[in-house]
Image: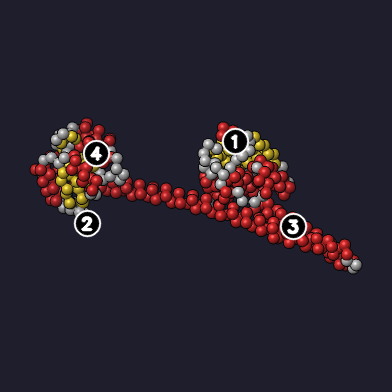
Amino acid sequence: MASVEHTLPLRILHLEDSLADHRLTVLALRESGMSVEMHHVDILADFLTAMANMSFDAILADYQLAGFTALDAWRFVADKPLSPPFILLSGAIGEAAAVDAIRLGIADYVLKDQLFRLPHVISRACEVHHARTQRELAAQELAQSQKNLAQLTEHLQDSIEEERAAIAREIHDDIGGALTAIRFDLAWIERHAQDGSVTSHAHAATEMLQHALGASQRIMKNLRPPVLDQGLAAALEWLARDFEHRTGIPVNLSSSLRNAELAAHLQLVAYRTAQEALTNISKHAAAAAVDIDLSDAENVLTLEVSDNGQGMDTEARNKQQSFGLIGLSERAKTAGGWLDISSRPGRGTSVILSVPLNQDTAYDPRCAL
């Protein structure tokens, strides 16, 4: 017999109603050099009890037993996650029945008059089971890791939006208020100064101050535009006109929203998607025109931002440094939607956000910032 060595004893559950056959099986395994701990049961109730209370590396089962078959035991094992390999060891099973059993998920079968094959079959079944278990555990860990990453992404996005809103409020309340007060003082000085040089300096300072006020308002609106309170369509209209003013690229905005009361977090997701898409266009697209389409047809919120620029190839879209596109995709997932990017070199680019509206889109106070 071929020698099969194991550093630890294999725990094997043997379902066999013939004590003599059980002893022959134990002898064959030990003579092969395989270290095993055998647990013998001969009725289905004891089998179920052993499976419920103990752990095993493999199961051996005769096919035809008193009042039931190995398939009855297998049906119990098959329902359990990461169950040990189940091997038929029988002298009363035909080739066709054995093949059918393997199709059901049973690991293998060995005839009782070929016990010399059993150590190898057990070893191979345990190796396959171990590899499958490791793959399943790795898949579970990956799924959990992806879930944790999605939760972290959502938390970071919430934190970023909260920080944006806080900074915008501070700019409006503190910096904006202080700059406005200084403007009034400069206007007073300009009206009452007797020295022409003082008046000239006050006038120059007023112009610089006006520039600072404009910059602060622009930064505040980019952080969290107040126009969002008027609805998504109005916010996108402001964003489009601001983009035109800054870049000189005309934007055609088409909106067919029927639901004006979209949840705040959906409006914010759509707005940030459009904002990032327009930023990418201004930096990379070399476009002459931009189209923005917004709709909620078929109960799906759809935002498409397309340009007629130079487009992107697949490699550019998939590069690891494309954090803007990755962020948009993750943001879409947190809203229960998805992001599609369609682009060909020389044919422009389309960024499409789709979010089903038949999910829970209740008001989220974290997003009303």
The reply to whether discs 1 and 3 touch (Cβ–Cβ < 8 Å) is: no
Q: Which residue is mark 1?
A: 296
Kind of residue at badge 3? Leu
Q: Residue at x 49, y 51 (%)?
A: 151
Q: Which residue is mark 2?
A: 7
Q: Quadrant of residue 231?
A: top right
Q: Which residue is mark 4?
A: 74
How packed mark 2 is, by other alpha carbons closer than 10 Å (few <14, some 14-19, many 20 or more), is few
Percent of width and height locating residue 82: 30, 45
Q: CA distance from mark 3 to mark 2?
A: 77 Å
Asked whether, in this view, residue 122 is left or right of residue 150, the answer is left
Q: CA distance from mark 4 to mark 3?
A: 77 Å
Q: Nearer the viewer, mark 1 or mark 4?
A: 1
Kind of residue at badge 1? Asp
Question: Mark 3 falls on what kind of element?
Answer: helix
Q: Quadrant of residue 121?
A: top left
Q: Is residue 208 shown to the viewer in this render?
A: no
Which disc is residue 213 wearing?
A: 3
Question: Mark 4 falls on what kind of element?
Answer: helix
Q: Nearer the viewer, mark 2 or mark 1?
A: 1
Q: CA distance from mark 1 to mark 3?
A: 37 Å
Q: CA distance from mark 1 to mark 4?
A: 51 Å
The reply to whether discs 3 and 2 touch (Cβ–Cβ < 8 Å) is: no
Q: CA distance from mark 4 to mark 2?
A: 28 Å
